[in-house]
Each structure stands twice: as C-alpha cells, then as structure tokens.
Image (cartoon, helix red, strand yellow):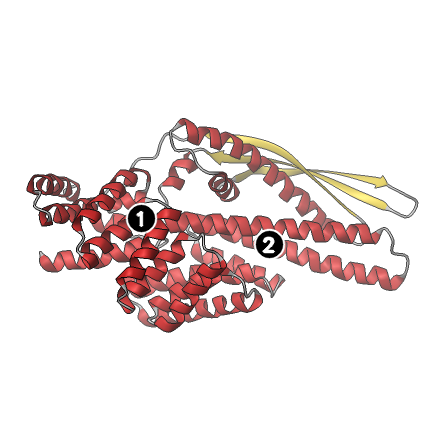
C-alpha cells in the first residue's frame, strides 16, 4: 500500500503540471462525467473583401470567406456567453473567443458574389462577397470547462496570437492597396505585385496556423503538426507556427517516453520540439510563450540550468502567466530545494489563476514538502470545491480526498479523516 501511495503522489504531481497530457481518467477508473444536452445552432454571415489588378483574386475570395466565418463565430459568441451565464458557468470573453474560433463547423458550400466597381478611370476594384453557414454546438461550453487549465490557457494564447497576426496582415494589405492608387510606372507595379504576393503567403500561413490550432483543439496532433509545417513553408519566419508545433511535439514526446515507454522515439521528437522553440525565440526574442514552453521541455529533459533561465525570462516578459510560475516552482522545489521561492511561485499562480489545479499544486507542496497540514487542508478543500467544473480535476478527486484524509489524520481529526477515506473508497470502487 505504501508503494502504491508513493506511486500516486508522483503521478498526481505529474498530472497537475502536465496540462495537455492528462491520462488520469483511464488510470483511476473514474468514468467520464456526462455532458449536458447539446443544441447545435446555425449562424449565417457575410464577409466582404475587394482586390485590384495587382492581387490574386483567389486570395481575395479566401479573405472574404475568412471574414464571413469570423462574423458568424462572433454571432455564436454572443449566444454562448449568455448560455454560459444561464448554466452558472459564465466564461470570459477570451474563453468564448477561443471556443468559437476552434469549435465551429462550416455547413455546405460557401456562396460567393462577385461585382466589379470602376472607382476612377485608372482604378478598378473587384469586390467579393462570401456567405457562410456555420454550426456551433453549445455543449462546447461544458467541454471547455472540463479541459485542463493549461490546455485552456494555451488555446486562449493561440487564439489571441492568430487574431493579432490576422489584424496585422489586414493592415499590411490595406496599406498596399492605398499605395497602388498612386503607382504609374512598371517598376512600381512589379514591386507592388511582389509585396502583395508576400502578404498573400503570410495570410495563407496564418490560415494554416489557425487550422492547426483547431486540429490541436480536437487533439488531432499529427494533423496539427502537418498544418504548422505547411504554415512555416509558406512563411519561414512565422515564429508562432514554430512555437505551437514545438508545443505539440513536446506533448507527443512526453507520451512516447512516459506512457508508451518508447524513449528513443520520444527523445527524437523532443529534440525536434527544442529546435522549434529555439527557432521561435530566434525569430521573436521577446516571445514569452516560447520561453515558457522551452523551459518546461528543458526541465523534463533534466537540463535544469537552461530551464530556470527560460522560466525567469518568460515571467519577466509576461508576469501574468500563472503556468510559468507553476513551472518555475518545480525547479525551486525539486532542484534548488528552496521552499520559500517555491511557495511564493505557487501562491502567485493561485493569485493569477485560482483554479482546482493551482490549489492542488500548492496543497501538495504544503503537505509533502512543508508538512503544513492545516494549510494543505484549506487548499485541498478549495480544490475539491472547484473540481466539479474540471474533468481532469474530477478524475483526481478520489486522490484529493485521500490526501486530505492524510492531513486530517496528521492534525488529529480522525472523524474527518475517516469521512474522506469513505469518499475515496466510494470513488475508487466506481
């Protein structure tokens, strides 16, 4: 029994940290919790874009389609925000955007309408209207809140980055279109065509990244890696594509090493992930997300000096990312043996993102490192309260009860310890 508990302490700690690689539902034998009755809603929207003689009309059509989809998902977001509130699980705007951007389905064919407008004697514009029908399932709200904290944080970051890249590309194209009104010589026209071509490749690359994120959202990791690779081929300096490909490769490597026990293949994939993070940081030296991801990879590879350097840099660049504080606490706790700094980082993570997993990480530290059982009880209790809204946390609920029972026993409250053990045994028997 003692050996089993030691095994589970290690597994618990690993599961709390590794957000996208949570296998506890199968290991623990806890059944998946039911998803609320789903309702699929259809949203119809139009997007408009225009092009001139210097542009690829195929790309202009795609831009119109992209705008139509974004308009449809914005409509869906208004409904999902209200729906989440109605089921007492109101989500933030960032969460709603991450869901609608990654969980939609285009229904049927896109309808296009093309018109030609003669603006001046020299300027002719071709206007494309795209109309799309998009399905969004409101059960995505329930699925979202059951995702792991790190998984949700990653998807929000990816969605923000995609939005920012799309907006920057739109500004670049609009600037080129304004410049095209004043070009009269062949050299100027050739230069504009080359710049439009570059902007088009950037747009297509961003589209690949967005689709890759959607596939990652569906846990289709191999397909997502392929899309990120295609994005890089279109735009070799796409730092975001390198970072997110590295993130998935690192997750796949961990599965190969820890679950499949195929260490050689896992190490090869991990090396590819490291190359991706290095390239992302080379292209974008202030890329906090890439530093955090590379630091975690280095920690898992036991390259501790490199990991702490990356964690420090990630936090310096973005002090609001709770996951990086949890990552860094691992270093203080397991390598430097600095309990003060470990507790400070875990508490900062709770402050920034007070979720079940954040409390579980600190509770585990209070209990097993500091032997502060009273503080651990407070955090285990809060984690249990929050676990109802997180499938990963639910899968660990029996162990929350077990470790809280240990704490109650340590402070002499045998009645509460016995009650928690009964809950542990009941969940274990499912």
159 left or right, relative to 262: right
Mark 2, residues whose alpha carbon is within 10 Å: few (<14), some, or many (≥20)? many
Q: Residue furthest front?
A: 340
> Which image quadrant for residue 305?
bottom left
Asked whether 137 or 21 is in front, the reply is: 21
Which residue shows up at 75% across the image and 60% down it? 195
Which label is found at residue 357? 1
Residue farthest top in this picture: 86
In the image, taking residue 8 as reference, residue 130 lies left or right, namely: right
Check the picture and name the quadrant holding the N terminus.
Answer: bottom left
Q: Is residue 304 left or right of residue 125?
A: left
Which is in the foreground here, disc 1 or disc 2? 1
For the question of whether residue 149 can be seen, the reply is yes
Looking at the image, the residue that sits furthest to the right is 121
Image coordinates of residue 73 in percent, x first then y, are 55, 37
Q: Secondary structure at mark 1?
A: helix
* Residue 288 in picture, x, y percent from top left: 49, 60
Quick one: label 1, few (<14), some, or many (20+) residues within 10 Å? many
Residue at 27 percent across and 52 percent down: it is 362
Residue 30 spot, x, y in % from top left: 22, 44
Tell me the quarter of the picture where residue 282 sits: bottom right
Which residue is located at x 72 percent, y 59 percent?
197
Tag 1 near tag 2, CB within 8 Å:
no
Work out how far the residue at label 1 is from the one at label 2, CA to CA, in angstroms: 32 Å
Residue 148 showing in the rendered view = no
Q: Would you name the residue on which mark 2 appears?
A: 206
Q: Compare residues 105 and 25 and report the one nearer the observer.
A: 25
Up the image or down, 80 lies above or below 32; here it is above
Assign the C terminus to one quadrant of the image.
top left
| Location of residue 395 with respect to 242 vertically, above or below | above
Local SS, label 2? helix
| Sequence-earlier tag: 1 or 2 | 2
């Amino acid at each position: 029994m003692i050996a089993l508990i030691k095994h589970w302490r290690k597994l618990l700690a690993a599961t709390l940290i590794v957000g996208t690689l949570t296998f506890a539902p199968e290991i623990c034998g806890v059944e998946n919790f039911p998803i609320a009755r789903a309702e699929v809603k259809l949203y119809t929207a139009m997007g408009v874009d225009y092009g001139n003689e210097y542009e690829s009309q195929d790309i202009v059509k795609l831009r119109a389609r992209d705008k139509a989809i974004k308009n449809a998902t914005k409509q869906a977001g208004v409904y999902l925000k209200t729906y989440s509130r109605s089921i007492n699980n109101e989500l933030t705007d960032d969460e709603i955007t991450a869901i609608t951007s990654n969980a939609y389905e285009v229904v049927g064919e896109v309808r296009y309408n093309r018109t030609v407008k003669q603006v001046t004697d020299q300027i002719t514009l071709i206007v494309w209207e795209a109309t799309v029908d998009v399905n969004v399932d409101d059960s995505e709200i329930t699925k979202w809140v059951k995702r792991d904290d790190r998984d949700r944080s990653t998807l929000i970051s990816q969605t923000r980055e995609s939005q920012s890249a799309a907006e920057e590309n739109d500004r670049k194209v609009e600037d080129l279109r304004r410049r095209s009104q004043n070009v009269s010589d062949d050299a100027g026209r050739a230069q504009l065509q080359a710049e439009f071509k570059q902007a088009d490749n950037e747009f297509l690359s961003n589209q690949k990244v967005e689709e890759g994120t959607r596939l990652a959202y569906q846990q289709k990791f191999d397909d997502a890696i392929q899309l990120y690779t295609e994005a890089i081929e279109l735009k070799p300096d796409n730092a975001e594509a390198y970072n997110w490909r590295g993130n998935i490769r690192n997750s796949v490597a961990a599965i190969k090493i820890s679950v499949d026990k195929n260490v050689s293949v896992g190490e090869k994939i991990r090396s590819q992930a490291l190359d991706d993070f290095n390239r992302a940081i080379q292209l974008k030296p202030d890329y906090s997300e890439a530093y955090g991801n590379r630091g975690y990879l280095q920690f898992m590879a036991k390259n501790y000096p490199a990991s702490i350097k990356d964690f420090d840099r990630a936090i310096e660049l973005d002090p609001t990312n709770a996951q990086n504080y949890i990552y860094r606490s691992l270093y203080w706790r397991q390598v430097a043996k600095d309990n003060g700094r470990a507790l400070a980082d875990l508490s900062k993570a709770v402050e920034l993102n007070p979720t079940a997993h954040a409390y579980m990480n600190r509770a585990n530290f209070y209990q097993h490192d500091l032997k502060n059982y009273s503080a651990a009880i407070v955090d285990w209790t809060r984690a249990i309260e929050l676990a109802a809204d997180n499938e990963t946390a639910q899968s660990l609920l029996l162990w929350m009860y077990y470790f809280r029972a240990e704490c109650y026993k340590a402070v002499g409250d045998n009645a509460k310890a016995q009650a928690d053990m009964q809950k542990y045994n009941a969940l274990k028997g499912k």
